[in-house]
Image (cartoon, rainbow, N blue to C red):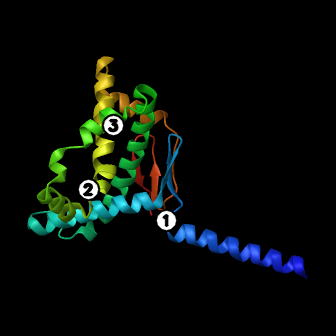
Amino acid sequence: MNKYWIWLTSVVGGALVVYAFISNGFFPAAYADGEFISARTQEAQVTAAVTYYDTIIKQAPPQGSAPKSVKEITPEIRRGVVEKLIENSIVRHQFAKKLGTAKQLIDAKVNDPALDKDETKKNIKALYGLDIPAFKQMVLMPQARKELLAAKIAEEKLNFEDWLKARKKEARVIIFLKGLSWNGAEVVAKAK
């Protein structure tokens, strides 16, 4: 009888832990080049992108075929964010191979004194819904890695965009999100 209660408590406890992890986004949204991309990271990026596009749409009245609300383009935003996260993962992996950590180079590009100004902080918060540390992590650091890697590739007399396309084709990518897949070059929406 004692073993039964221990077993039951273990199963229920394990189920609660799994539920807590899943409900907080601690499960993979994608796998790219040896790195898992969490659903939590993906959702944070989608939220920032939706905030950005919502702000832009509200500031400039839509004309012609332009979207009238962010809801119209949210699926495309989600697809684009997953693609960008996969590209960031591939760039991070290739960056580590070619340049190591290069923390000082990245910090030099990311730590702009203008980011400490109250006006800049206010604008980033209004435009993306992010504070400065999150903005650095989500936007500036990936961009800095990409620019530094592009410079390294240019030293090798190669076109960075062509080189990156080849790396994307070589990378092992799996998308765990419903409705999206990887075609070897980009994230595409699955036909319904």
**What secondary structure is marked by label 2?**
helix
Relative height, residue 169 to residue 71 (above, below): above
Gap in angstroms between the C-alphas marked 2 and 1: 22 Å
Where is residue 158? Give x, y as percent: 32, 21
Instruction: Determine which residue is flagged by label 1.
Output: 25
**Nearer to the camera, 130 or 80:** 130
Gap in angstroms between the C-alphas marked 3 and 1: 26 Å
**What secondary structure is marked by label 1?**
loop
Q: Quadrant of residue 169?
A: top left
**What secondary structure is marked by label 3?**
helix
Q: Nearer the viewer, mark 2 or mark 3?
A: 2
Label 2 is placed on what type of residue? Ile
N-term mark: 3 or 1: 1
Label 3 is placed on what type of residue? Arg
Circle 1 crowding by C-alpha within 10 Å: few under 14, some 14–19, many from 20: some
Relative height, residue 192 to residue 88 (above, below): below
**Left or right of 127, for residue 41:** right
**Nearer to the camera, 167 or 113:** 113
Q: What residue is rendered at 33% in x and 37% in y?
A: 145
Residues under numbered marks 2 and 1 in contact, where contact means CB atoms less than 8 Å apart: no
**Nearer to the camera, 70 or 45:** 45
Is residue 161 visible in this depiction of the protein? no
Q: Quadrant of residue 61?
A: bottom left
Circle 2 crowding by C-alpha within 10 Å: few under 14, some 14–19, many from 20: some
Where is residue 72? Give x, y as percent: 26, 68
Where is residue 35? Give x, y as percent: 51, 45
Instruction: Determine which residue is flagged by label 2.
Output: 132
Q: What residue is rendered at 19% in x and 44% in y?
A: 112
N-term mark: 2 or 3: 2
Relative height, residue 91 to residue 182 (above, below): above
Instruction: Determine which residue is flagged by label 3.
Output: 145
Gap in angstroms between the C-alphas marked 2 and 3: 18 Å
